[in-house]
Amino acid sequence: MSALTSGISATRELKRFFTEARDGQHSDVSVLRVHIRGEDLVETARAHGPSNGDLMQLSEFLDDRVGFLVLRASPATWYVVSWMPEDKVSVNNRMVYAASLPSLKLAVGEGCVEGTLQFTTREDALGSNSSTAQPAPIESQCDLPTATETAPAVVPKPAGLKSTRSFTTTKTTTTTTTLEYERMERRTEQRCSVPVVSTRPIGLTRPHADHRSSVPAIAPKPQAGVFVKKIDPRLAMSRSELEHVDLLQQEDDARTEQLEQMRTRLHGRTSVAHDDNQNAANQHANTAGIKQTTAAASGGFHSVTLPLAASATDALGGFAANVGTTVVELQIDAAKHVTSMRSFASTEEFAPNATEPRFYVMRTPGSRAFVYSCPEASAPRLRMV
């Protein structure tokens, strides 16, 4: 959970653009396309248009390449759009772009981000009538009769089904099936939040005055913020919020590790109490169904208790009495006892041993520290002791 950000940041030019935009410049720019190039977020294209958050302005950028589209929602705010074309994006690219979203939002400015959107198909972004071809005539889209056609006949509504309308003309008869009607009606209800503008020819009356047309003549332009998809809420968090979540996770991991260590020690003590003749270092403890040993849990080492020599006791006594001793150096002598080697009156005089392991008891302003020093050049035998 700590690797939510990719380490990729915006280029200096992209940051300068958004800084100047916040100062009132580049007011004619409505869309920016941003791609990841190496370790940077780079602007690769831009478009000019109104600052109204119209998603139709994204049409020319919705190709097969994954990327970010920054759409101007107002003169001072932007929408950050993640374009992930369906079946065209690898899992790795999807993860990298998702992890880089906070960096792009930071470049735009936390107070200038109106919202975060994500689309995978052109239909999601532009509506069900979007395509690369030109839209068909109004009459063919809505199956409306022309002025020379006869009046439409009303077909009785089947039980349990929504209304199905059939228009009989002198040229052809077109029937909209219930399945197609329900699909288009459902898409209209989900995607359109504004009233449908009637495009009925002049002089043509509705069969039912209190019932709206079953199929909209022209799908209205999608409005900004209508097609928001549910995405990972962590992608919309600020940097401070993400750091707070990571800190909580680290605390949980540390707490779990401490509980496991305590459980292992408790099992080891219980085994020793049941059988005093066995070596505690070889007692098997079954923790969460996994066999472990005390020696294995400690990396193969076990603790050794050594007495303090008289010199070490005197040096530590002077250190505790604060009689001018700031640092005490301790050494294990012949693996039998701990003896004092040197004492220092100040940290400026202190110089650690560079060839052998040592213990140091040090006094710092407001605290005391116990330091174990083990130089890389020391002998393995001394390290083990």
Image (cartoon, rainbow, N blue to C red):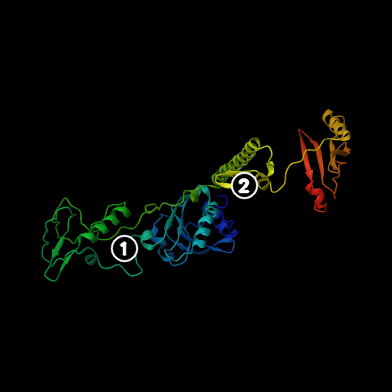
**Considering the numbered disc 1 on the image, is that residue within a helix, a strand or a loop?**
loop
Q: CA distance from mark 2 to mark 1?
A: 64 Å
Hey, which residue is sitting farthest top in the picture? 321
Image point (23%, 59%), residue name: 181
Hey, which residue is sitting farthest bottom in the picture? 171
Give 302 or 222, whichever is nearer the viewer: 302
Residue 292: mark: 2
Give 17 or 286, whichever is nearer the viewer: 286
Q: Amino acid at mark 2?
A: Gln
**Considering the numbered disc 2 on the image, is that residue within a helix, a strand or a loop?**
strand
Q: Position of residue 346 (x, y in %)?
A: 86, 37
The residue that disc 1 covers is: 129
Hey, which residue is sitting farthest front in the picture? 277
Of labels 2 and 1, the one closer to you? 2
> In which quarter of the view is residue 342 placed?
top right
Image point (17%, 55%), residue name: 163
Give 208 or 308, whichever is nearer the viewer: 308
Q: Amino acid at mark 1?
A: Asn
> In which quarter of the view is residue 107 placed?
bottom right
Q: Position of residue 51 (x, y in %)?
A: 43, 55
Q: Position of residue 152 (x, y in %)?
A: 12, 62
Q: Position of residue 377 (x, y in %)?
A: 82, 53
